[in-house]
Amino acid sequence: MLNISVKSISGKIDKSQYKSFQKLERKKSSKLIIKLLFILFLTFIITMFLPWTQNIRSKGNVTTLNPYDKPQNIQAIVGGSIDNWLVTEGDVVSIGDTIVVLAEAKEEYLDPDLLTNTKDQQTAKSNSADAYSSKLQYLEKQLRALSDNRSSKLEQIEIKRAQLDLEIRSAQLDLEASITYLQNATNQLERMEVMYEKGIKSLTDLETKRLSIREANAKKISYDNKLSKLRNDQNGLIQAIDVTNADYEQKAAKLRSEIQSTASYRYNLLG
């Protein structure tokens, strides 16, 4: 029953029919689970004391934040084949050090007057820069002269406007006076016609009053036309101000554009 002897009877009986065997089986399995849990707990405790930092080996390239410490490209003014290396990989060089000796592919490409031509080119660039500087100064003077011209024109227009204002006020007074004179002449004519009908005044006096009315009406029309002309001149001066400002802005914009272009060309030559 306890499987102590060599000859076991576990294969000869049906254990499912006996509750004792089932309880014994459960007890064995529960002990096994407890052992497994205990082993897991010990493993967890041991891993708590293990270092978590791990080292990894890999390959890579080391770079630097300083641009001058990075690999630099070498630019040659004249192309050719390398005749001799004066440095090896890893050597530290400074600005101006000779690194390689170049042998030109064809000797006819070598310019014996290279230094002279280079100096002439530098002189030409310097002269061009001076020319652009002179042009820049001339354009700036033109812009200032254009601004002064606009100010002068606007000042003249303002003087004319002030004169027109005085003439308009004078014409308005003359017109009001002519209207008053016409009204008085009309009233006098009406009284003269009544007196002529009564025989108090003669036909000559009546015709004289009628002539006075025509003269007063003519003066009124003349002053009215004069006032209209002065107001038209005033509107023309206002338009002249707008035209002067628009003309200045157009020419000034063109000059500013030329100044910026000239300054850019000069900067490129000097740079």
Image: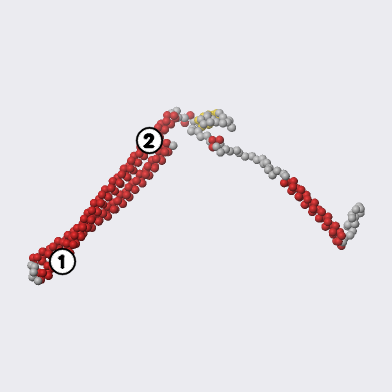
Residue at 60% over, 39% down: 61
> What's the colour scheme?
secondary structure
Residue 35 is left or right of residue 205, and the answer is right
Closest to the observer: 33 or 247? 33
Please say if 224 is above or below 131: below
Tell me the SS state at disc 2.
helix
Residue at 74% over, 46% down: 46
Of the image marks 2 and 1, the number of the one nearer the N terminus: 2
Residue 202 locus on image (x, y percent) = 8, 67
Determine whether label 2 and label 1 are within 8 Å by CB: no
Residue 102 seen anywhere in this rendered image of the structure: no
The quarter of the displayed image where residue 199 is located: bottom left
Amino acid at pointer 1: Asn
Residue at 68% over, 42% down: 54
Residue 13 locus on image (x, y percent) = 89, 60
Q: Tell me the residue that label 2 is attached to.
A: 130
Closest to the observer: 26 or 183? 183
Q: Quadrant of the C terminus?
A: top left
Residue 163 is left or right of residue 7, and the answer is left
Residue 79 locus on image (x, y percent) = 50, 33
Q: Quadrant of the N terminus?
A: bottom right
Q: Give the crowd class for mark 1: few <14, some 14-19, many >=20 residues within 10 Å.
A: few
Closest to the observer: 108 or 126? 126
Residue 187: mark: 1
Residue 53 is left or right of residue 88, and the answer is right
The quarter of the displayed image where residue 130 is located: top left
Tell me the SS state at disc 1.
helix
Please say if 199 is above or below 97: below
